[in-house]
Image (cartoon, rainbow, N blue to C red):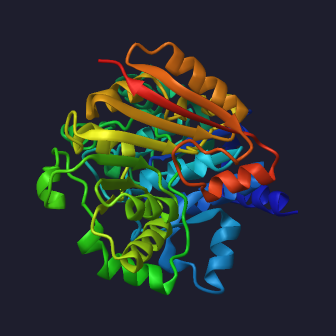
Amino acid sequence: MLAAIARLLLRLGGWTPVGGVPDIPKAVFVAAPHTSNWDGVWALIYKVAIGLDIKFFAKQSLFWFPLGILLRGLGAVPLDRTRAGSAVDQAVAQFDNNEEFFFGLAPEGTRSFRSHWKSGFYRIAETANVPIVLGFLDYGEKELGLGPIIDVSVGQQAVLEECRRFYANVKGRWPEKFGPIRFPDDEMARKPQRSVRSFVRRSGRLTGSQEKALSELWPGYGIEFEDAPLELDRVFGRRAPRVLEIGFGNGDTLVQQATENPDKDFVGIEVHEPGVGHCLIKARDAGIANLKLIMHDAIEVLGGQIPDASLERVNLYFPDPWPKKRHHKRRIVNPAFLALVARRLQPHGTLHIATDWAGYAEHIDEVLGASELFRCAERRKHDGDRPLDRPRTKFEQRGLKKGHRIVDWRFERID
């Protein structure tokens, strides 16, 4: 019924719809030219007319009742500008969390003339590894719809060239406001292309105590990310063996290890704010001073903030297994990660890994077995009763409830 009404409105407006829903599960949709408020109106009518389920960002502050119901019905997704990470991160998370997902945006970013396009659409498509679909509104021919599908793997310049070719003869409502199709000369240098991430920054509701902890306890336990090596002796006020844990979850076991090993210093990395808040509370209650936390991407922390040969041990407990084949590239255990960890470990330092996913265990065996940087000092398969030199974690408990078996490894750096 709604589709029929939308098609009628297009006819009454003199528009001819072009194209249909692409036969692909995921894509970033570009909407151009964008020179008038009417562009959004006609685009929404078109998507209803052809049955295109496409999402777009709207400011989170607009989702008040009852406007929020209408916005969600139109396909809007709340954009939380207060969260760590950019709109690109939040869009990529939507792709990672959905089997099928279409996301649309106007790269001009404004109805006024702009000397360049914003690069967000390209960075989203590249990071999420999804194609780009070119949408258009041609006021000259009174046609609107979908054009070519571009494989993002062709590269930035090829994508821009195809956009220029396609939109060369497309006329916006106010043609003088449609600027050149290019990225600003310095934008791609200022915002370097992200590597494929091994995690999804999942949203979560902070409790009052966690929010208070992040405000009051972070200055004492937290380390802000900077792309420069830390002086760990100065950070901890002493020289001691150091352990790095990647993805500590809610921090219960990290605090337990730090409490039981006061002669060692611990650094924990986690991106989930509620987990960091919980860990801060536990650390305060335990009264420990040998723990520091970093809330950032672990690969970037390892690459830019942890000094060479500064760690006695690295723990990676129950990382995201990314079980679907198309997501295997996101698994953190890969040759590049091993090379990074090896440089940060001291001679004979160790890498400890645990997982409850059989497929990931095979992957770890394969990658580490082919590595010339590590040797397997111990491998232990068990039913949760024999963890290898570590506490039991909540993720382990979940796996055991599903009937999974646990595999632990201790790998030693080869010097």
Q: Residue furthest right?
A: 1
The part of the image, by quadrant, that contains residue 265 is: bottom left
Depth order, front residue of 106/12: 106
Residue drawn at x 28%, y 51% as measured from the top left: 114
Q: The N terminus lies in which quarter of the figure?
A: bottom right
Image coords of residue 108 (percent x, y): 37, 50
The part of the image, by quadrant, that contains residue 310 is: top left
Residue drawn at x 76%, y 50% as measured from the top left: 400
Left or right: 307 as drawn, with respect to 109: left
| Residue 28 seen by the camera | yes
Residue drawn at x 59%, y 28% as measured from the top left: 379
Left or right: 327 as drawn, with respect to 278: right
Image coords of residue 346 (percent x, y): 26, 32
Depth order, front residue of 117/65: 65
All told, the count of numbered labels is 0
Left or right: 413 as drawn, with respect to 201: left
Image coords of residue 95 (percent x, y): 60, 46
| Residue 52 seen by the camera | no
Residue drawn at x 63%, y 72% as measured from the top left: 71
The part of the image, by quadrant, that contains residue 235 is: bottom left
Depth order, front residue of 110/343: 343
Q: The C terminus lies in which quarter of the figure?
A: top left
For residue 169, above or below residue 403: above
